[in-house]
Amino acid sequence: MSPGIGTAASDHDPRSSSTKGWALHQAAAEVLPGGVNSATRYVGHPYAFAGGDGAYVVDLDGNRYLDYHAAFGAILLGHNAAVVDDPVRAAVGKVDLFGLGVTELEVELATKVTEVIPSAEMMIATMSGSEATAQAVRLARAATGRQLLVKFQGGFHGWHDAVARNVISRPELAYGRDPLSAGILDTALDSTLIAEFNDLDSVRALFEQFPERIAAVIMEPIPHNVGALVPTQEFVEGLRALTSAEGALLIFDEVITGFRHALGGYQEVVGVQPDLTTFGKGMANGYPIGGLAGPRSLMERFDGQKGDVLLAGTFNGYGIGATAAIATIDHLRTHPDFYTRTHALGERMRSGLSSIVAELGLDATVAGFGGVFSLYFAAGPIRGYRDLMRNDDQAYAAFHRRMTDKGFLMIPMSLKRNHVSGSHTEQDIDRTLEAARDVLAGMKADGTAR
């Protein structure tokens, strides 16, 4: 399949009940809860995809989209990138699954990760980012002998009980008790404390309120699950100093920022090293794998012979995922222009959107870093979640939906960010900005945005 196959999405409505996508959604709803395998994949209208190539995806009815969703950021280089898929094809039929001992691929992957992530001396492989953060929290509690965890309002660190609270909270629930799911024990919810991003005093206050009880502070260095809240250098350095002084660990959840913003993650950008780093998403360009890295003194707690923290998982380090991750990292190491290029395209998008917003006189703010961009429908500056509570969620979702209807795939859900992959071009960005001008002008005209 090439980018030229398929019609523009605006030529064919995927929400029509006569489409193949609608029929598949109806069939899916009979055997999958809600018709999807992950809660946020259904956003009010059915989408059913048939394939992807580079910066494009095509749905079941032949509609072609320029993809900025990128599977929540897992697609880093582009869909079906040959530099990753070719080694994977070569690995199929050789190294599959043994469930005993170790393979050369696992050692090679761990070696590469410890070479590129500044704070990493050892690593473990997992199957997902959620598993990685679960292991990080467990390790932090074991290492400190403490129970409590601090996360930031708006930060998402996976589905497990320890962190499944206070992500995109309604204003009346923000900073209070806002679990993501039923079925979580009260003790798990109460063991996680909520602070404000870019507000060091809010973290310091929790340490003062719960002296010698906080095991770790976990943070997305840029909380991309609520768009793109970029931290100040002072805030990150202050967290490092505060956690060290208080005997707590600092965990960077780089599941999204890792490998996307720099080969060494956002910690390379800010020059601050956490105690533990989790990663996943783009490290294998769409193949499922995640991991956790840190200093030898902490990671050896996972040693099954002499450590005391359980690490288990039949598929951890499996051959296909490891091969994809090795290939992706190798490509990034030998093509450092990936970062200069995607950062430049991201800035082209952000500056273009800012000009359009100013031209139309909209009450909106463009944010982002590297190849990630978000358009908040609220006046700036936007530094933390308190600022995000001014965002017009309906306008945010409407902008993404109307862009998707024009053939530019942006998940139509409030506060979800957009990604530029290694396959996007300047022409793609410029076409997107032209469409964005039309969409935003239409939203202003019909009162959807002000």
Image (cartoon, helix red, strand yellow):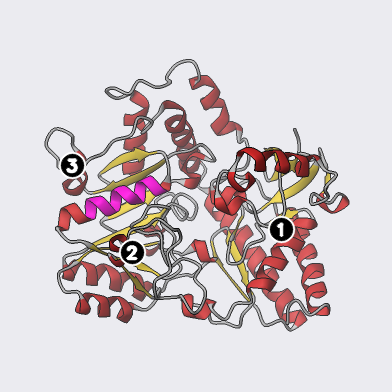
Above or below 320: residue 381 = below
Locate the C terminus by quadrant.
bottom right
Q: Give the x, y percent position of residue 255.
A: 43, 51
- Residue 371 % position (x, y): 57, 58
Give coordinates of residue 323: x percent, y percent: 45, 29
- Please tell me which of labels 3 and 2 falls first in the chain: 2
Amino acid under disc 3: Glu
Which residue is under mark 2?
A: 189
Q: What residue range appears in magenta?
A: 130-140
Which residue is label 1 attached to?
A: 429
- Residue 60, visible in the rendered structure: yes
- Is 306 situated above or below 195? above
Looking at the image, is 343 positioned above or below residue 3? below
Residue 23 location, quadrant: top right
Secondary structure found at label 1: helix
Q: Which residue is at a point 43% across and 43% down the rendered structure image?
A: 128
Residue at the right extreme, as displayed:
11
Residue 264 location, x and y as percent? Answer: 39, 51
Q: CA distance from mark 3 to mark 2?
A: 28 Å
- Residue at mark 3: 300
Q: Is residue 59 magenta?
A: no
Dot 2 alpha-carbon crowd within 10 angstroms: few under 14, some 14 to 19, many 20 or more? some
Q: Are marks 3 and 2 in contact (CB under 8 Å)?
A: no
| Residue under the point 33% across and 52% down | 277
Q: Nearer the viewer, mark 1 or mark 2?
A: 2
The N terminus sits in image quarter: top right
